[in-house]
Image: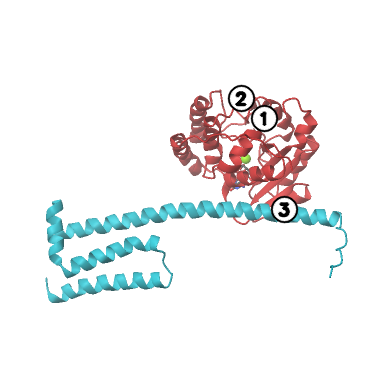
C-alpha cells in the first residue's frame, strides 16, 4: 500500500465530518474538501441537528448519515468508521464541520499516514494562531504531556478533531471507538497507542469558526480538566485491545 | 410491641410480596429486577412474623439497637438496586447508540441504492414461469 499512487489513496479515503447544527458552515466545508482533494469521498454525520445541516451537506455533494437523536462526536465517528469499512474505504479523515480545519491540509496528513496508523493535526505545533486559555488550556497541556508518554511520541494537541486514521486503526475504531464525552479524543488515543498503533502529529493551522456558536462556555471549560483526567485515568485502567489483521476487503 | 404494629408489619411485607409476585406473573417485571424486592419482602415477612429473629441477628452481628440492623439492611438493598439500575442504564444507552448508528447506516444505504436504481433502471422483470 505504501507505494500506491496518491490518486488511488485519495479514492480510498473517506472524510468524515461530525456535525451538530452547522448549516451555516457545513456546506462550504464539504465543497472545500471536495474541491481541494479531487476524487475524495465525504460523509457528513448529522447528529440529530435541529437545523438543515443534512440538507445543506447533501446539496454540497456529501453523503449524509442522519442519526435519529444526538449521540455525540464519538458515536458519530464510529458510524463513520463502520461506513468506511462497509464501503471499501481504507482511510478515514475526521474534519470539523465548523470550518476550523483547512481541508487543503488533508494531503499532509495522508502523507504522514504512510508511516503511521493515526495522525493528529496539531494546532499548537507552531503553525497558525489558535489559542485556548484558562483551565481548558492547562488541561490540554497536561493531557498532551501524559498522552505523549503513552503514545511514545511527542504530541502537543491531543484534543484535535483533525485526524487521519489508517486501515489498521479504522478496523480497531469501528469496533471500539469510545462515545463518552472526551472519550473520542483522549480515550481513543490511549486505545490506539496501547493496541500498538503508531501515532504521529502534523502541525496544522486553525481558522476561526465559519458560523455557529462555540460549544465551550467558561463553565464547561472549568469542568473540562477534571473530566479529561477522569477519562484518561479510566482509559489507562482498561485492558488493552489487540489489533486484528486490519485487512479491509474492497467491495 | 402492640398487636396492631405486629399485624401492620406482617401486612406490609405480604403486600410487598404480593405486588412483586403479581407483577412477575404479568411479566411487568423480570426476575433479574425482582430478585432484590423478593429478598426484601421475604426478610420483612420473617422479621414481621418472628420479631425474635431480628433481636437474635442483631446480637450475632453486634448491633446494639436491632432497628438499626433493619435500616442498615434496607439501605444496603436499595444501594444494590440502584447500582444494578445504573449499570443496566449504561448498557441500554450503549445499545441504543449502536442501534441509532445502524439505522442511520441502513437509511443511507437504501438512499444510495435507490439513487443507483434510478440512474440505471433494472431490466424489466422476467415473466413468471408457470
Ligand atoms: N456528531 C456530533 N458532532 C458534534 C457534536 N457537537 C459538536 N459536534 C461537531 O464537532 C465539531 C467540533 O465541535 P466544536 O463545537 O467546534 O468543538 P471545538 O472545535 O472543540 O470547539 P470550538 O473552539 O468551540 O470550535 C463540529 O463539526 C461540530 O459540529 C455532537 O454532539 N455530535
Ligand atoms: Mg470547532
Percent position of residue B13, x then y: 25, 70
* Colour chain B is painted in: cyan
Q: Mark 2 touching mark 1, by CB under 8 A?
A: no
Disc tally is 3
Which mark's residue is nearer the viewer, 3 or 2? 3
Tell me which label, 2 or 1, sits earlier in the chain: 2
Residue at mark 1? A205
* Disc 3 from disc 2: Cα separation: 39 Å
Placement of the N terminus of chain B among the 4 image quadrants: bottom left
Q: Give a yes or no on whether discs 3 and 2 share a subunit.
A: no
Q: Residue at x 37, y 73 (%)?
A: B22
Nearer to the camera, A119 or B120:
B120
* Disc 2 from disc 1: Cα separation: 9 Å
Which mark's residue is nearer the viewer, 1 or 3? 3
Residue at mark 3? B109
Nearer to the camera, A93 or A87:
A87
Q: Please rate how many residues cluster around mark 2, counting C-alpha atoms within 10 Å: few if below 14, some from 14 to 19, many from 20.
A: some
Residue B71 in view, yes or no: yes
The quarter of the displayed image where residue B7 is located:
bottom left
Nearer to the camera, A231 or B66:
B66
Report if the beta carbon of the residue with label 3 is closer than 8 angstroms to ligand 1: no
Q: Chain of mark 3?
A: B
Q: Is residue B2 left or right of residue A64?
A: left
Query: The residue tagged with tag 1: helix, strand or loop?
Result: loop
Query: The residue tagged with tag 3: helix, strand or loop?
Result: helix
Residue at mark 2? A125
Percent position of residue B126, x then y: 86, 63
A114 vs B66: above or below:
above
Placement of the C terminus of chain B among the 4 image quadrants: bottom right
* Colour chain A is painted in: red
Report the coloring of the rendering: by chain
Amino acid at each position: 500500500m505504501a507505494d500506491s499512487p496518491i490518486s488511488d489513496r485519495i479514492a480510498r479515503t473517506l472524510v468524515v465530518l461530525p456535525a451538530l447544527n452547522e448549516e451555516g458552515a457545513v456546506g462550504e466545508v464539504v465543497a472545500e474538501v471536495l474541491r481541494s482533494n479531487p476524487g475524495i469521498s465525504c460523509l457528513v454525520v448529522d447528529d440529530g441537528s435541529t437545523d438543515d445541516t443534512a440538507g445543506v451537506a447533501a446539496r454540497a455533494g456529501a453523503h449524509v448519515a442522519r442519526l435519529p437523536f444526538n449521540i455525540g462526536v464519538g458515536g458519530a465517528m464510529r458510524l463513520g468508521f463502520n461506513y468506511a469499512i462497509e464501503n471499501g474505504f481504507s482511510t478515514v479523515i475526521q474534519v470539523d464541520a465548523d470550518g476550523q480545519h483547512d481541508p487543503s491540509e488533508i494531503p499532509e496528513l495522508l502523507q504522514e499516514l504512510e508511516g503511521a496508523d493515526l495522525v493528529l493535526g496539531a494546532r499548537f505545533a507552531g503553525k497558525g494562531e489558535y489559542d485556548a486559555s484558562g483551565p481548558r488550556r492547562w488541561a490540554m497541556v497536561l493531557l498532551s504531556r501524559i498522552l505523549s508518554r503513552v503514545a511514545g511520541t511527542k504530541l502537543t494537541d491531543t484534543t484535535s478533531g483533525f485526524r487521519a486514521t489508517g486501515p489498521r486503526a479504522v478496523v480497531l475504531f469501528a469496533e471500539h471507538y469510545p462515545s463518552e464525552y472526551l472519550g473520542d479524543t483522549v480515550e481513543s488515543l490511549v486505545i490506539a497507542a496501547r493496541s500498538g498503533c503508531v501515532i504521529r502529529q502534523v502541525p496544522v493551522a486553525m481558522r476561526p469558526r465559519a458560523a455557529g456558536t462555540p460549544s465551550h462556555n467558561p463553565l464547561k471549560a472549568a469542568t473540562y480538566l477534571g473530566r479529561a483526567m477522569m477519562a484518561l485515568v479510566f482509559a489507562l485502567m482498561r485492558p488493552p485491545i489487540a489489533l486484528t489483521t486490519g485487512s479491509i476487503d474492497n467491495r | 410491641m402492640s398487636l396492631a404494629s405486629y399485624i401492620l408489619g406482617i401486612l406490609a411485607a405480604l403486600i410487598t410480596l404480593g405486588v412483586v409476585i403479581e407483577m412477575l406473573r404479568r411479566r411487568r417485571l423480570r426476575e433479574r429486577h425482582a430478585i432484590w424486592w423478593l429478598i426484601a419482602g421475604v426478610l420483612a415477612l420473617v422479621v414481621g412474623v418472628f420479631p425474635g429473629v431480628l433481636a437474635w441477628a442483631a446480637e450475632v452481628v453486634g448491633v446494639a439497637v436491632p432497628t438499626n440492623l433493619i435500616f442498615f439492611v434496607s439501605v444496603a438493598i436499595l444501594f444494590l438496586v440502584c447500582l444494578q439500575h445504573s449499570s443496566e442504564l449504561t448498557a441500554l444507552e450503549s445499545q441504543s447508540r449502536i442501534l441509532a448508528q445502524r439505522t442511520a447506516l441502513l437509511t443511507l444505504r437504501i438512499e444510495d441504492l435507490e439513487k443507483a436504481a434510478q440512474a440505471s433502471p433494472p431490466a424489466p422483470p422476467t415473466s413468471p414461469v408457470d
